[in-house]
Amino acid sequence: MGMSVTISAAAAQDAEHILKLQYLCYQSEAELYGDYGIEPLTQSLEDLGAEIAQGHALVARLGEEVVASVRCKVDGEGTARIAKLIVHPRMQRHGLGGRLLDAIEEHFAGEPAVARFQLFTGHRSEGVLRLYRSRGYLPVTTERVGPRLMVVTLGKEAATGAYAASA
């Protein structure tokens, strides 16, 4: 019988595993854009640890192995900024990225300080863009950040109010 993937809050001791997974996952993005100097490939363990401590991070585990992760931080204007949604290449295209995205949104659901969600990706990352669009995210801005890269920011409003139970 196979193991199931569990999703839980990331802890400080997960930082090294997340960083290694991040490095693996962003290789294809670096190749796609011809830029191996992108921030996810150059981020330090200390910086990643600070991101976990200052925001909220989730990990998905297959047994003890961290196979996916996502991070989010709410800014002063009520925007929950979702970042670095990563899934191990062997686990991709099985719905895990969507499960993590749903879980991070659910974590912030109902928080009065959260009015909207935003995330971003490169303009050529069609699979990622498809995932985000399938979860209701719409393009907000597109910004050229290099000769080969435009960053597409997508967003959606946070659900307001509690869900009413049907009778």
Image: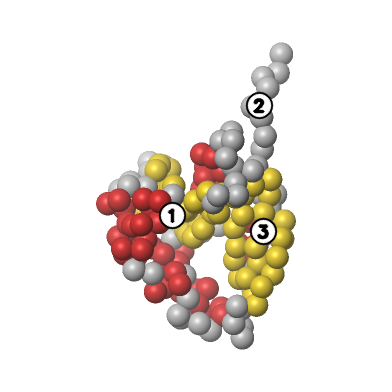
Circle 2 SS class: loop
Circle 1 SS class: strand
Q: Where is residue 77 in the image (x, y as percent from the top left)?
A: 60, 49
Eye-nearest disc, 3 or 1 = 3
Is 17 left or right of 40, judged from the image as shown? left
Which residue position is annotated with label 1?
68
Look at the numbered discs 2 and 3 and tell me whether their residues touch, using CB distance below 8 Å. Answer: no
Q: Position of residue 82 (x, y in %)?
A: 54, 54
Circle 3 SS class: strand
Q: Is residue 95 above or below residue 43?
A: above
Q: Quadrant of residue 120?
A: bottom right
- Crowding around mark 2 (Cα neighbors within 10 Å: few <14, some 14 to 19, many 20+) is few
Which residue position is annotated with label 2?
163
Residue 90 appears in view: no
Residue 146 appears in view: yes
Q: Which amino acid does label 2 sit on?
A: Tyr
Which residue position is annotated with label 3?
154
Task: Compare marks 2 and 3 and give the one earlier in the sequence.
Answer: 3
Task: Compare marks 3 and 1 and give the one earlier in the sequence.
Answer: 1
Q: Which amino acid does label 3 sit on?
A: Leu
The residue under the point 37% across, 47% down is 10
Q: In which quarter of the image is residue 23?
A: bottom left
